[in-house]
Amino acid sequence: MATTPSITHGGALEAPPRRRVPWRTVVNKLLGAILVLWAAATLCFVMQELSPGNKAIAILGGSGARPTQHQIEVTEEKYGLNDPILQRYGSFIGDLATGDLGTSYQYKQPVTSLIKEQVGPTLVLVFVSTILAWLISVPVTLWTAGKGRARSSLGSGFEAFFAGVPPYWLGLVLLVVFSFELGWFPVTGGTSLDALFLPSLTLALPLAGFLGQVTRDEFERGLKQPFAISARTRGASEGEVRRKHVLRHALLPGITLTGWAIGATISGAVLVEVIYSRPGLGNVLVQAVSNQDLPVVVGITMLVALIYVLVNLMVDLLYVLVDPRLRTQKAVA
Amino acid sequence: MATAIDPTVGGLPLPGGGAPARGGVVARVRGLRPVVLLAFVFVALLLIAAIAPSLLTKGDPLQVNLGHSLQAPSLEFPFGTDQSGRSVYTRVIYGARESILIGLGATAVGLGIAALLGVAAGIGGKWVDNGINRLLEVLFSFPILLFALFLVAIFGSGVSTQILAVGIASSPGYARMIRAQVLQVKGADYVIASRALGHPPSRTLFKNILPNAFRPLVVLATLGVGQSIVWASALSFLGLGVAPPAPEWGAMLDAGKDYIQTAWWLELFPGAAIVATTLAASCIGRYLQRRIEGETY
C-alpha cells in the first residue's frame, strides 16, 4: 500500500510522505499549548482583579465576621494585596509555573495540596465516563445507523434525548430509580466500585448522545463512500464493511469531539459529585464559589484548562501520527 | 434587494420571510413532521405559562399549606406537593417565566458579545482576526459551567449574575460560528459585486454582509435558549442562582433534593420541564436549520 501514490486528496498525484515523527509540528503545537495556558492564566488574573469584593474581608470570613480595620490591614499585608498590580501579576504567573496556586481563603491551606487530595476521584469519574460513553455510543451506531427508517430514528431519538438531558436531572432520576426504588446501587458513597457506576453512567449517557450524533452522520456518509463500495464489491459482507471500514472512518471525528467535550465532562462531573455526594473537586468548587474563595476557584479553573489543553494536544498529535495527510498540510486546526 | 439573497447561504427564506408560499399557514402546519409540530405546541404552552400562568393553573405558587405537605401526584395535585404543601404543578407553570427569561437573557448576552467579536474578527483584517481567534481559543479551555461558576465567584450569586455568567460563558462558541459565517458571506459574489459597484464599505457591511451573516443566528439562538436554560438551572441547582422559595425549575430541583428519598415527584417534574424545553428548542432549531439550508421536510 505504501508505494501506491495517493490520488484521493489534493487531486494531483503526490508521493506519500515518509513515516517519521514531524518534530516541527509537535514543537509548534507544544508552544501553542503553553501560550494558551499563559493567556488563560492572565485572563484568570484579570477577572480576579475585576472582583468588586474586598479580598481581605473575604479571607477573614466575609462581611458577617465583622473584622476590625487592623485585622484587614494585617491580612492585606500578609497576602500582598496592596502590592502594585504588575508585581502581583508576576508572582501569580511565577507561582503558577511552579505549581503553587496560592492559599485558600476559607481553609487557610495551600490550594495545590487541597486539589491534590480531591482530584483523584474526579479524574477517575471523568475517565470511566468517557470510556463508558464510547462503549454505549459505538454499539448504538452500529446497530441503528443506516439500517432503515425505524431503527435509525430510534437510534437518533435516543441520541437526541440524551444529548439534551441535563446531567443533574439524569443523575437525580437514576438515583431515584436504581438506588431508592430498586436498591441496586449505594445511595451515596465513597470511591468504591459500585458507587462509581451510577455517577459515571450519568455523565456517560449525555456524552454518548453527543458523540453518537456525530458518529452517526459520519457513519451514514461513510456507507456511501467509495471505500465502502469497493469493499462490498470485493465481497465483504455488510457487517464487515460496517465494522471494519465504515466504523473506523466514523470514529475519527468522535475522537476530536471527545477532546473538546472533556471540559463539558468535567463540568458535568462537578454536578454529579454534588448529586451523589461523591468526594472530588465538585463539592470543593461549589463551596469555594459560594464563599468567594477565589484562589480555590482559580486553581480548579486553571487545572481544568490544563487538562483540556493537554487532552486536546494529545488528540492533535495522535492525529498527526495517524493521518499522514496532516503532516504535509500546514498545521490543520 | 433580491440580489442580496445568496442561494448558497440563505436558501429558502424563513417562514414569513416571503418564501415561495405553498398554500397558507394551514398547509404549512400540516406539512410539519409530528415531532416538530409537538415541539411548536409545547413552546406555545410554555409561552402561555410564562405570560399568563393563571390560565393554566388556579393555584398560587407560593401558597404554603402544611396540611398537604409532600403528597404524591393525585387528581387535585397532578405533580404532587412539596414539603410546604405547595402544588408542584402550579410551581412548574409559574417557573416557566423565570426560567425562560433567564434563558432568553443569557442567550441575548451571549449572542450580543459573540456578534461583536465575530463581526470584528470577520471584517477587521488579519490582526484583529488573529487576536480574537486566539482569545476564543483560550476561552474554549474554560468549560461553560466552570466559567460561569468563576464569574459567580467573582460577582456573587444572584439572578443577574446568573444571566451574565451563562451568557458570557457561552459566547465563545457563538462567536466562532458568527465569525465563520461573516467570512463565508464576505467572499460571496454579491458582496464582491457590491464592492465592484463602488458602494461604500459601510453600505456593503450593513446591507449585504450583516443581514446574510446573521440569518443563521435564528437557529443558533433557538438552540442557545435551550442550552442557556440548562446551564442557568444548573447554577440554581447548585444553590448559586435563583434562591429556592422562588418557583424556578433549577431552584425547585435544588429544594427537592433533600426529600428525594421519599418524594421523587419533586425532582421529576421540574426536571422534565427543563428537558422538554431543551428538546423542543433543539427540535425547532433543527427544523429552522433545514429550512434555511433549503431542505423541505
Image (tube, coloured by chain):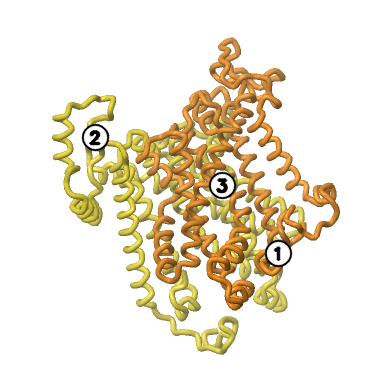
Chain colours: A yellow, B orange
Chain ID of residue with mark 3: A
Q: Amino acid at mark 3?
A: Leu
Compare residues B97 and A176 and report the one nearer the observer. B97
| Image location of residue B124, percent across then percent down | 46, 67
Q: Mark number for residue A59?
A: 2
Q: Amino acid at mark 2?
A: Ile
Q: Is residue A266 above or below residue B261?
A: below
Considering the numbered disc 2 on the image, is that residue within a helix, a strand or a loop?
helix
Discs 3 and 1 carry the same chain letter: no
- Marks 1 and 2, how far apart in space? 58 Å
| Image location of residue B54, percent across then percent down | 67, 24
Q: Mark number for residue A205?
A: 3
Which is more N-terminal, label 2 or label 3? 2
Q: Would you name the residue on which mark 1 appears?
A: B11
Q: Residues within 10 Å of mark 2 (few under 14, many from 20)?
A: many
Residue occupying the point 38% across, 51% down: A304
| Image location of residue B266, percent across then percent down | 57, 26
Residue occupying the point 57% across, 52% down: A208
A159 to the left or right of B18: left
Q: Amino acid at mark 1?
A: Gly
Compare residues B81 and A200 and report the one nearer the observer. B81
Residue occupying the point 39% across, 65% down: B131
Chain ID of residue with mark 1: B
